[in-house]
Amino acid sequence: LETIDIFNEDASLNSFGLHYEGKDRFEVRKEISKELKEKGFLTKVEPYTNKVGTSERTGAVIEPRLSDQWFLKMEDLAKPAIDAVLENGEVRLFPKKFENTYRHWMENIRDWNISRQLWWGQRIPAYYYGDGENDFVVAETSEAALIKAKQKSGKDYLVVSDLSQDEDVLDTWFSSWLWPISVFGGILEPENEEVSYYYPTSDLVTGPDILFFWVARMIVAGYEFRDERPFNNVYLTGLVRDKMGRKMSKSLGNSPDALALMKDYGADAVRVGLLLSSAAGNDLLFDESLCQQGKNFANKIWNAFRLVKGWEVVDGSQAEAAKMGLSWYNARFQEVLLEIEDHFDKYRISDALMAIYKLVWDDFCSWLLEIVKPAYQKPIDRTTYTEILTIFEKNLKLLHPFMPFLSEEIWQRIAERKPDQALIVSKWPLKEAFNSTLIEEFSFAKEVIGGVRNIRKEKNIPFKETLELFLLNKEATPNNLNVVIKKLTNISTIKETQESIPASLTFRIKSNEYFIPALETLDVASEVKKIEEELSYTRGFLNSVNKKLANERFVANAPEKVVSIEQKKAADAQAKIATLEQSLLNLK
């Protein structure tokens, strides 16, 4: 059917509107209803709710209107971009799940409507020389268009003033898809030094909401204009949304005031708080408490620095506990460094930050500093102090990509440095071999320390009261970390015993049982109840593991490592049950 457009550009009716020509659309709606009624053509009137689109800026009602548009044929252009991401992996998306979205868009691609009816932007380079449907040419300049128009029309008498350029402008994305090339001047000067050196770039970081509108089109343009990908990797962040789940935007006015957040929490705190809670590709509902978490972390680092710089330093021998703690932390640092670099390689940025967060907050602040910290109003030996500062500097190198301001400030305060010694230009820590056995042994020691601390807390035994610890050793454990256990729990001696110690406070780590003699503070009935509850839970746990191991399909189909883990769980539970039963006998 022939398409008939009844509207002028100002939404008044044109000649196709017959005797309503020149009148406004709203006025005509009332008049046509009245005319239909007068002529007896109107049989029924009823209310009808309709969705009416309005302009965000002016509130004007938007009318659908037929108009000529310019399109870019995309089917052939898209093929190299499809192969680059989905076939040969020349361009990689992180997270990989977005490849499905990319595939859907690109394999069902439609021609691109590149014209916009706006009064700003780059005008469509089409020039009209007549009123016919095909009386136009496309050229870079009006002079070039005149030559083409003369050739196409056969009218040699045409002059530039006879041409009229299309008033539509190009879609914003039509400029943006050239960004990786045009930013180096590579469109007008395809072989210039900068574009030859920098193109293709390494990484693009953006949101998944413009994966098709921008990312895919840049890849298309790269292969079309330079026969090469524009970048190697695309890291797709999550979107920060408001509490209602709406995307933050200028038009909605739902974005927080970034300057106010930085003033209240600090720039680094805002960065860290959001990153800790935002895995790649997953949206984040903004909550100011996230910034508070970042601020708490920044305060923790700053207070750790103040603590270390506040120690009195003297020459002297290094304490054994400090020596063991430093050896453990250096091994732990190397273990976490491998984990962090693996996260970076896979573009798991928030996971890398979380690994650093735990290393600094837990391992460094909560454990290492407590191990090396001198007694109240006592000095620290110079060797330990120097090693702690070296470790602090290594921590700052890991923190710097996420907390550039705080880390650089502390780096400059640790020692007087020249500009070329700034943290931002320092070398990333080197990977070194480390003692994984020491890390495992320390994990066991931490459980022992936790057991003693729990007993002190439950029985209100102050830390200043020195205790003795006896170990009924059923699982071989190293004693090289006893110096650390003693310092962090105020234990005077750790002795092995071949039998249970009566009238003692007890706890268990795996199949080992630990005793703290405390006859005067021991509530036997309470201890019996506690052990019976733990015994009941452990028996239930063992029963569930045994059911799994009795399932032939599980044992036959599960990986050997998984089955081995379940068997180890069962053995540990059996040993713990035996220990608990013996503890009950001793108490009764």
Image (cartoon, rainbow, N blue to C red):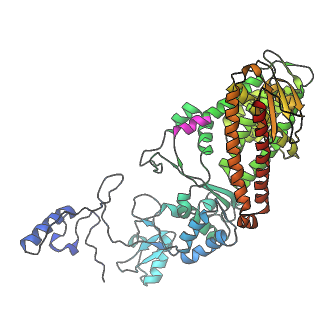
Q: Position of residue 352 (x, y in %)?
A: 70, 47
Q: Is residue 522 above or below residue 216?
A: above
Q: Is residue 330 above or below residue 466?
A: below
| Residue 475 in view of the camera | yes
User: Is 147 situated left or right of 570 in this image?
Assistant: left
Q: Position of residue 284 (x, y in %)?
A: 54, 48
| Residue 421 in view of the camera | no
Number of labels in the image equals 0
Magenta span has 290?
A: yes
Which of 303/517 is in front? 517
Which of 155/44 is in front? 44
Q: Residue at x 89, y 38 (%)?
A: 478
Magenta span has 396?
A: no
Main SS class of the magenta portion in the image: helix
User: Is 546 situated left or right of 40 in this image?
Assistant: right
Q: Residue at x 83, y 43 (%)?
A: 440
Which of 504/587 is in front? 587
Which corner quadrant of the image does residue 133 belong to?
Answer: bottom left
Q: Position of residue 36 (x, y in %)?
A: 11, 72
Q: Position of residue 230 (x, y in %)?
A: 65, 63
Which of 109/370 is in front? 370
In the displayed image of the protein, which residue is found farthest to the top?
A: 377
Which corner quadrant of the image does residue 384 belong to?
Answer: top right
Magenta stretch: give its range: 286-294
Q: Quadrant of the N terminus?
A: bottom left
